[in-house]
Every structure is written in C-alpha cells, then in structure tokens.
Amino acid sequence: MTPLLDRRHELDLITAALATAAGSGTGSLLVVTGGIGIGRTALLRALPGLAQRHGTRTLAASGAPLEQDLPFGLVSQLLEPLCPGTALEPPGAAPYGDLLAPVAEVSAREPLLLLVDDLHWADEPSLRRLGQLVRRLPALPVTLAVTVREGEPGAAEPRLHDITDRAAHVLRPAPLTPAGTAALVAAAFGRAADPEYATACHEATGGNPMFLTATLAALSGTGDPVAARAHTVREQRLPGLRERLAVALRSQPGPVRELAKALAVLDDGTDPDLVGRLAGLDAPGHREALAALRRLGLLAPAPGTRFVHHAVHDAVEDSMTPAEQEELHTFAALLLHRGGHRAEQAAAQLLAATSCQDDWAMDVLRAAADAARSRGAHEEAARYLRRALLGSSHSGPDRAALLVDLATVERAFDPPAAVRHISQALLLLPSAAQRAAAAVRIPPSLLGGSPRTVVEAVGDLAGELGGPGSLTGDERELALGLEARLRHVAVTGPGGLLHCAPRLRELGAEPSLRTAAERELVTVLLHGATMAQGLTAAEVAPQAERVLQHEPAHPDHVHTALPLLVHTLIATDSLETAGPWLETARERARRQHATVPQGLIAIERTHVLMAHGRLAEARACADEALELGVAHWATLQSMAAVVLVAIESRDTELARRLLSYRPEGTDHGYRPSSLQLLRGSFAAQRGDLPTALEYFLDWGRSAERADWRNPAVFPWRTWAAGLHYRLGHPDRAHDLIDEEYERAVAWGTPVAIGRAQRVKGAVTAGERGIELLRESAATLEGAVNALERARTALLLGRRLLHAGHTEAEAQLRRARDLALVCGAPWLAEGAGRELRTLAGSRERQPAAALTRTERRVAGLAAHGASNKEIAERLAVSSRAVEKHLTHAYRKLNVAGRSQLGSVAHLLPGPGPAAAPGF
C-alpha cells in the first residue's frame, strides 16, 4: 500500500477532532480540498485506522457523476451499515426519514466518523440532509470529514457552500516535498532512491501524488531506476490517467474546455492574448477559465501558463476530433503568422494541419525552413519543406523548386534522398538553365554512385546547355559545374581521366579561380591528372595550393568537388595548409550541427593524418566518421581513407566493419573497389598469401583499366611485390616494383619514391639491397610521412644487423621511436626485438673472447670458489689461477672478483673436477 507522506499537519488536526468528539461529545466538520490528484481520497482512506484507535466507528460514502440524479444516493451509502436491507423509496421520498435520527442514536452508544469523498458530486437531497447534520454536530460526538475537488462546477453550488462554510478546518494538502517524493520512489522500488532519479521524478510531476504514482507504475517494468535517465522520467507517457483527466475536463463549462484545447494546440501559454483568441474568449472569460483550470490543478504554478504534466495535454488532445484539431492548428498558424511571430512557430502548427494549402501557409513553411537551416536544424527544415510539398502542384515548377530546396537541406543528413529529389526535379523544370541549377546541387561523389539514367540525364543536360566557352554569366557557371561533375564521373568510361591534363592545359598556366564553379572544375581536372599521372607532382601541387587559397573553409565544400583537392594535395606531399583548413571547416560544421559535412570532413582529416603517418590519430578520425554514420550514405571512393587506415593499422575489427558495408548506389563497372584491397590485406593477416596476392592483382587490373596509374594514391604494386617475394616469385616481385619505382620517379614525390626504393631493397639480397634501403632512408628524410620513415628504418636496421654493420642499432632505435610516435606498436615491437637480440649478442661477445681455461677459471670464481679451491680443482698452481683471472677481468671489462657476479650468467658453472694437466 502506498504510504501517506507529507501529511502530518492534516493528520494531527483530524486526530485532535476525533479526540474531542470522543472525549467531550463535541463533533466538527473537516473539509479536505485541492486540485486533481493532490491526495484528498488517500488522506480520507487513512482515517478509519485513526478512528479505531479512539474507539470511533467509521461510516463512508462517496459521490459520483453518474449518481448525481439519484435522490438520497449518498445518504443511502452512509446509512446502509446502520439500517441494512432497507430498500430505497421512490424518488422524492426520504428513505430513512431524518438523517439525524439514526446518527444520533448510534453516536449515543459510540462516537462516529463520517467520511464523504467527492462531495461536489452529491445529489441535492443528500446535500440537504448533510446540511442539517452539520448544524447539529457541536451537540453530537460525530466527526464529519468531506473532500471537495476545487475547480469542479459542483463545488460552487450554494447547498455545498452551506455545508463547507461551517467547517472547523479546511485542509489543503500541498504537493509532496522532494524528500516525500524520494520516499515514495523508494517505496515503489523497494530500495533507496537515487538522488538524481528522485529529483527528476519530482520535477516531472511537481510533487503531485497522482502523477507521481502513475509515473512510477509506468516505469516499474523498465529496469533499475538508478540507471534510468532523467529524460525517461520526464517523457514518460501516462495513458492510464487520460480517462480520469478527460472526465474532469468534460465536467467543465465550455469556455474552460476551449481554453484547455487552445493551450494544448499552442503548447505554450506565454502569449495570453493569442491563447484567448484561439479559444474564442474575451479577456474576462479568459481570466475566469484560466482560474478554473488552476483551481482544478491542471496548470503548473505561475509564472507562465502550461499544463502541470504532459498527460493533461494528451487527455485534452484525445478529447478533440480530428477535424477539430485540424481547424485549431490551422487557426493557430494563421494567428501566429498575422501576429508577427517566428515563422517556425506557425510552421509547427501547419505540420499538424495538413489540409491547409493556402499561399500564406506555403510562404510560412519555406520561411521556417530557411530559419531552421540557418541555425543548423537541417532535419527540421526538411520536415517543413516536405509539408510544403503537400500544397504544391503535382508536376509544376513550384514543386520542382521545393524538391531542389528539400534536396539542398537533405544533403546535410541524407545524401541519397537528396539525389532522388533532385532527379525528380529535373523532370519538372522547364528550361535547361533551371535544370542545370538543380543538377549542380548533386555532389560529384554522389553522382558517380547514382543510377545510370541520372548520370545520362546530367550529360544530356550539359549538351543542351552548351559548352562553357560559348556561354557567359550564370549559364557559364552552370556549364562549368556540370562539366566538373561529368569529368569526375568519367561518363565516357575508361580513358576519361586521360583528357583531364589536356583540358587543364587549355585553361592556361594559371586558370581563373574567381568563381566556385571555376574552382570545382580545376579541382576535378587536377585530381584526374593526378590519378592518370598526366602531370607531375611539381606541376599539380602549385595549382592545388592556389585553389585552396581561394576556397573558404566552409562545411558545404563536401557537397562540391573540393574533397578531391585534399586527395590531390596528399598525393603531391603538400600537407602544410590542408590540415588547418579542414580544422576550420570542421568547427563550422559542428556549430551548424551538419552530420554529413562532419562525417565527410572526418574522412578528409583521416586521409591527411594517414599521409603524415599519424596512424593512431587517423584511426580516431575514422571512428568519428563511422559514428556519424558515413557508412550508410558515403560512396566507397570517398571512404578510401578509412579503408587505408584498416590496411595500414592491421585493424581486423575495423576491416570487418568495412567489409560488412554494402553501399547503396550504382557501380558503373570500371572503378576498382577499395574493399578488394581490404580483403587482400585481411587474407595476408590470416596467412593466406595466394588469396591476398590475387586480390591485390585483381584490384590493380581494375585500376589500370580505369587509368588509376599514380603510385602515390594506392601503392598496390608494393604490396603485391612483397607477396610475390614471400611466395618465392622474386622475378615477378622485381618486375612489379621496378614499374612502381619508375612511375614514382616520374611523379616525383619523396614518399612514393622512398616507398618504392624500400620495397626494391627488401626484395634485393646482399649489399645492393642494403644500398637501396639506404637510398630509401635518404629520400624519405624530411618527407611528410613518418610511418614510411619508420618502416624503412626498421628494414634497414634488420639488414644491417644481420650483415654485422655497427649502424644497425641507430636505425632500429629510430624505427622504434618513430613507430611509437605514429601509433604503430607492431613496428615498435619488431624494432624492440631486434634491439634485444643486438644487446644479447653484445653481452655474449666479451665471454666469447676468453680462452677455454680463462672461461673455466672465471666461472668457478664467479660462483664463489677461492683461488686455492680453483687451483686444487683444476690441478694447477695458484699463480696460474691468478694469471688467468687477470686476463679474464680485462676481457670481461670488470674491476675484479667482486664484479664477476654481474656476468656469471655468461660463464660456465663449477661442473666436475678436471683431470690433471687441464
């Protein structure tokens, strides 16, 4: 049973009244009043126990809405225990005559406690009889306790006031205190209440016992309350209370119900005039209805005007028909719009009123979408625009414009939907320029994964619009944007990338970068020329740097071709400005709450960190991108940096996550999939070298068909050459790495050249191999990628160690230190093992220089034998022992016998005594 909490004051007053009635025979009236759910009935239910302790008999009755028309119904309940089996007489008659008679008769034998719950629902004849009884209470040992719900229409009846005005005490139970709430929570769950959880319960219910007990009952099956979150409490729905609240509302007069509906629709009563106008009330009527809701306990304490709990909102909403809700939401939107309120407030009403398709409503929805987008609420903006689509034509340009606007905001959180909506808009827009303006909203990376029909539509549109050279102004900008997208997709299939370098040369030594479209096209051409190796790194790097200098570091760059610029700069070893530029864009994306830009920028930063060789930081960035959901909408090409992290870090968990990724979109058949490289790496880690090699070779064949020739982008030949060598195919390994080296030299970046030199050295035996590794170390010295330097240092250190070169230690220490900085523990451990081997060799080297007799003598001395004992054991003179020990001290580099213990592990033990003449 729920304990009665925070009611000590009320119980003390009632106890005193019972004692007075039982002791002096003087009765009294106690009225318990308050709003709904405050605990009036619970207090009454606790009184029979108190009465019993005072030798007082209890009689109880309660009013009910359906029994208000039943004459003497409430009095009958009270007197039934005194006169059992007495049938009610016809309406209008008094079945028990004067109520005073049986009460006076019984109270003469024993004191009485009469309990009447919900007196406001009592029938009129019963109220008259109770009124007569109340006037005689001072002369009877009878205590009468009644409850009245404030705000009920019946509570204002004169006959009820004729009773309650004679009360000795009017008790108004207050909401539970925080301590009382905590105690009730503890009682509900049978354990001490978590303070944070108890506070959340108190704040969510305002200490109202009804709302609190309903909340706890609803949460009782959700697990440990200590682990529950506060918002779970605040958002808990209470369907069990809706009917009770609905009954309370139905009994209210029309103005009160209309005000409750207005508050439910607006969900914010901070503008009283607006609420009153929506409810159709003038100022006095509004104040009177508001006071009734407060008395009823349905409103939270001032300031402000809001429901005490969202369960009240639900009950009011349930009381309205769908048509009524639609009408009120539409009227609310119109009032908000005409009153100069924020567009988003009016639009929120229109989301619930789908039938309104007037022009003003469409204007409100678009304005709200703009406002939401400007504050980074892209999904809210999309909801407003989807609602606006309901009011657009089915196939007109107005619908197309809305689709384009919707796609623009969807790019921030649902790129595939953005492409679908732009594709739909292309079918509805009348002019080529309008269609082109829509098409350039498709990010180039997404166009490549779009259905072929979409790509072909963009290609046809570019032909219809005309080439950039024949256009001016906005149309030239659109043509440049379309060209950038089509060249990125390479719709002509294999061979398309080969045209990028010549096209770039057509634009001049320093192409114009004044407009965004010009920068996009130059970026795509630079990227294509890099992939196909149509230019050298020395030619590409300055142009790429120029583009970055002209391009603002804005999150929306991810919806353009600009992410390709990061790939290009990495391939040219030009990383000085890319990192800070991306950091600025990242912070702006976070402030805008743009999920897709944050995810794609995380991938770009992953690539930059990988190019620096900072593997641990790159892994953290890759995790950030995956947590932002990039795997659900990014293309495989844009996720290549994450694949590289899995390969380079040997991270099997990340590899499995990526291999389970099933990209949406279309593979046009000639792009190599980076997942093939990941499968090859995974197979190599399992020890399945033939399968790994086949994956790498298969990827390489696809890359060649797609004209992806640059070894600085994906060094697949170095991986395949290493596998060939391990499988016993040195000739094939040399052929692959020679071609890789030749292309790396032609491209001209230290990282690509040094990596190829390292693999050439790895597959070349003897001093020539060491020479190639030295060349690799020299090439990579000062290069941007510290991880490549660590790999070369480790391999060179191993080869030098095995060849007996003294510089091995320096290379191995360098490899270990670089690997630790880069976050490559397996490389650091490999270098550590070699260093330990070297140290052990050095420890053994002095002992190896001893003669057999010196080792024997030093071993005995190290294990505690005196010179005399050694001489006797070896059958030699003491002078000979001293001579051998002197030589041993010098060779072992120890000061004397006292230090022999430090090298005892390198010397033989005592063993058996030697034969004479040893």
Image (cartoon, rainbow, N blue to C red):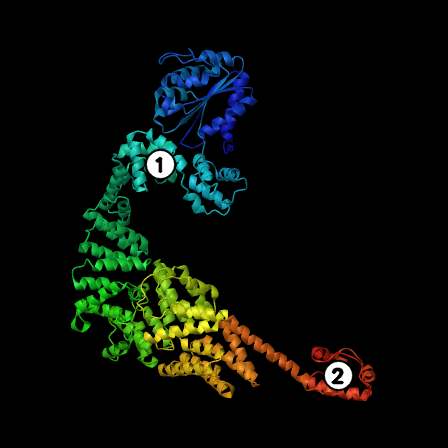
Other residues around mark 1 within 10 Å, as few (<14) / some (14–19) / many (≥20): many
Residue at image point 39% right, 16% down: 72
Is residue 515 shown to the viewer in this render?
no
Disc 2/disc 1 C-alpha distance (Å): 100 Å
Closer to the camera, 813 or 26? 813
Left or right position of 389 against 909: left
User: Is residue 155 depicted above or below 785 in this figure?
Assistant: above
Q: Quadrant of residue 246?
A: top left
Query: How far across and down, in percent of the image, does residue 350 sit?
Result: 26, 46
Residue type for callout 1: Ala
Q: Which of 773 and 62 is in front in this view?
A: 773
- Quarter of the C terminus within the rendering: bottom right
Question: Which label lies toward us, 2 or 1?
Answer: 2
The x, y position of residue 484, in whole percent, is 26, 70
The amino acid type, in three-letter code, at marker 2 is Arg
Q: Name the residue under label 1.
A: 315
Q: Name the residue under label 2.
A: 856
Q: Is mark 2 on a helix, strand or loop?
A: helix
Question: Residue at the spot x=23%, y=58% of the render?
Answer: 424
Nearest to N terminus: mark 2 or mark 1: 1
Q: For the residue labelled by badge 1, is the local secondary structure a helix, a strand or a loop? A: helix
